[in-house]
Image (cartoon, grey):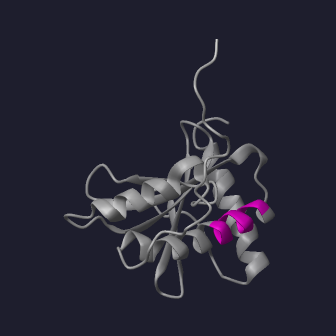
Amino acid sequence: MGEGEPRQKLDELLSAFSKMTGVPDLATEDNGVCLLVFDGRTRINLFADPASNDLVAWSNLGEAAEGSAATLRALLRANLFGNGTRGGMLGMMPTNDDIVLSFRRPLSTLDVEGLRDLIELAVETAEALQPLAAGQAAPAEHGHELPVQLGGIRG
């Protein structure tokens, strides 16, 4: 995709998504981001990254509190292999201590149904992780296991 094409593709997908859902006039703002708010509490940002030609969807889960080592450990466990994030990534904004859940999808193969699925995935996962990020919930007892049994190096 050329310069400006990723954003144009996202705006086309947002227009189709508007028609599909009946939500009027979805489009990116001047900064290139489209902010979707669900139930007045869950915010999903959508951005067409021109460097990678990916759609980036992210949600701020809240600010990491001082002395939140247990919370950060729980989030890192959820992040392990994407098992507790449903394939998303957890990180921190570089300008503050906001904990962020993000997903990436290639724009070149994304259609309106894929956009809908990504938005649903982002909302459901953000809502599941918000209490954990706030230190209000214990981590799940399962879902963060290693996909393989670790053993010694054999040569």
**59 displayed left or right of 133:** right
Question: Which residue reaches farthest bottom?
Answer: 39
**Quadrant containing the N terminus in the rendered view:** top right
Q: Main secondary structure of the magenta part?
A: helix
Residue at 29% x, 64% y is 64
Q: Quadrant of residue 88?
A: bottom right
> Does residue 94 lie above or below 74 as drawn?
above
Residue at 57% x, 60% y is 85
- Residue 13 visible in the shown view: yes
- Residue 36 visible in the shown view: no
Residue 19 image position (x, y, % from top left):
76, 76
> Does residue 29 lie above or below 155 as drawn?
below
Q: Is residue 148 magenta?
A: no
Residue at 37% x, 61% y is 99
Nearer to us in this view, 75 or 94:
75
**Quadrant containing the C terminus in the rendered view:** top right
Q: Quadrant of residue 61?
A: bottom left
**15 displayed left or right of 77:** right
> Does residue 56 lie above or below 13 as drawn?
above
Q: Is residue 115 magenta?
A: yes
Residue at 76% x, 68% y is 16
**99 displayed left or right of 33:** left
Nearer to us in this view, 54 or 118:
118
Residue 148 image position (x, y, % from top left):
67, 41
Question: Which residue reaches farthest left?
Answer: 66
Residue 81 image position (x, y, % from top left):
59, 47
Residue 86 image position (x, y, % from top left):
63, 60
Nearer to us in this view, 5 or 37:
37
Instruction: Please state the extent of the stretch shown in magenta in the rendering.
Output: 114-121
Total marks in image: 0
